Amino acid sequence: MLDADFEPTLATAEALARRWIDGIDSRPTSISSSAADAVAAADRPFPETGLGGAEVLEELAAIAEPGLASTGSGRYLALVTGGVTPAALGADWMVSAWDQNAGFAELYPGVVGVELAAARWTLEALDLPRDSAVGFATGGQGANTAGLLAGRHAVLAAHGHDVETAGLVGAPSVNVLVSDEQHSTIPRALRLLGLGTESATSIPTDSDGRVLVADLSAALDASDGPTIVCVQAGNVNGGAFDPIAEISAEIQQRKSQRGDIWLHVDGAFGLWVRASDRFGHLAAGVEAADSWAVDAHKWLNTPYDCGIVIVRDRGVLARAIGYRAAYLPEAMAIPNPVDSVVESSRRARGVPVWATLRSLGRSGLSDLVDRCCDRASELAAALEKVEGAEIMHAEINQIVVGFDDPSGDDDHDGHTNRILAVVQAGGECFPTGTIWRGRAAIRLSVSNWRTDSDDIAAAAAALTAAHRLRD
Ligand SMILES: Cc1ncc(COP(=O)(O)O)c(C=O)c1O
């Protein structure tokens, strides 16, 4: 049922959103619905007649809320999940109200201008080359794919092959050097780019998940064709950084002899340490890379979805990804954002990035990174004191912890997984699990601006209590 009066619908949306947000601190972090129940709750027949907007939203909230995760909570430590800052949420609402298509500068200049400013501030915050192309993608997957797409273009062009026109048939094969700790979005990008996962050579890592430079260097020496090296700034589990300064130096040295090497940095969350005086050194050397991927919806605490691809050479990204059509406006003085990401029409997801950076300022962003790292250190220190808990790796805002089975059965993995299930159901905090170096582990990511020392104490207590349940 369509009604020109937006007022009741917007008032209901605001009231429901307020109710959700006001409950963030008091609501248990457990999800009250199973996935099957949530799907069943929404599985209703397509109605014959419509409903007013306000009633639609009431019905929507009743259906969805029991299955919503407490992602905004300071005790939601799953995956790498940022909360949403007030400025980012407000800006995201405005993006929907404005309903602009951020792909085209001449048609939608207001949001494109704001996105360009957000792009400049991002380059400053991360201290990356200021002339780089910046694209607002859907997330780390989209940003990694776009960065590697630019890399595929450049390394094949260096061999005289125009992959955009000729495709991969007849192209020299591309070597992709990645660590055995690569994020799974990298092999998926290789599948999407037609390079295939077999194009990747897996380079071993140390016990913390850092690529071994000597092995990478040997692999570089052995690769005499087009080569993409993909390094990681922030391992999704333990937060480790590849020794990027050393790797960059190895690559720069080879680049003086050959033009067919591309260095891509997957820094989905870890790249934000560049905004911090205390932690920036971990990502030293990334500025020498050719492309970077970073997420705003992780540590920058914008709402989903927003990843950012950055490519040093604007022309390379535009040639690899850009497109034209007679009905679409040509870029004039301002480049079309459509030439930086795989999406054509898209929402102005860079606007919440602008709002977040505007509300934090340089010092607030640095403080956000520092605070999350400090809270993570507190949590690691608390868990270290628990007999039978083993911090497998903890770096920046990430912790990987396993627990020894106190029953004497040596079922450490089973015990750790049981702790995870008890804690997730208990509602005090919400971590997720992983396998770390062959062992079941619990991973804790402190990426939310709201997480404070009380949240950390609650998380430590919940994990400790669940571990001791079997004492
Ligand atoms: C290092 C790294 N790369 C890529 C990704 C994928 O990001 P997204 O889920 O936004 O696509 C993640 C997600 O945690 C990540 O940690």
Image (cartoon, rainbow, N blue to C red):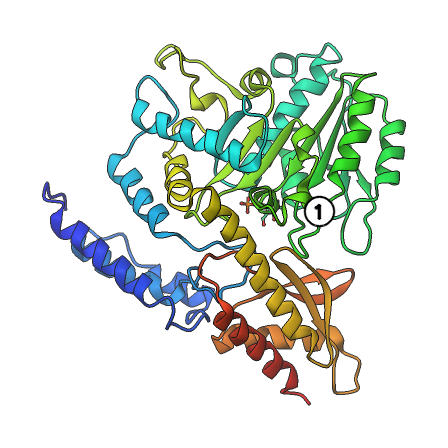
Quadrant of the snapshot with the C terminus: bottom right
* Residue type, mark 1 in image: Phe
**Image quadrant assignment for residue 148:** top right
* Within-10-Å neighbours for mark 1: few <14, some 14–19, many 20+: many
Helix, strand or loop for disc 1: loop
Residue 352 location (% of width, % of height): 38, 41
Task: Tell me what residue is drawn at x 12 percent, y 48 percent.
Answer: 7
Q: Is residue 194 above or below residue 202?
A: above
Residue nearest the viewer, comparing 367 with 62? 367
Q: Is residue 174 above or below residue 204?
A: above
Residue nearest the viewer, comparing 42 with 9? 9
Residue 54 seen from this side: yes
Residue 30 shown left or right of residue 328 in the figure: right
Residue 416 location (% of width, % of height): 68, 74
Residue 26 location (% of width, % of height): 37, 73
Task: Tell me what residue is drawn at x 42 percent, y 41 percent.
Answer: 357
Residue ID for mark 1: 241
Residue 154 location (% of width, % of height): 67, 18
**Image quadrant assignment for residue 317:** top right
What number of labels is visible?
1
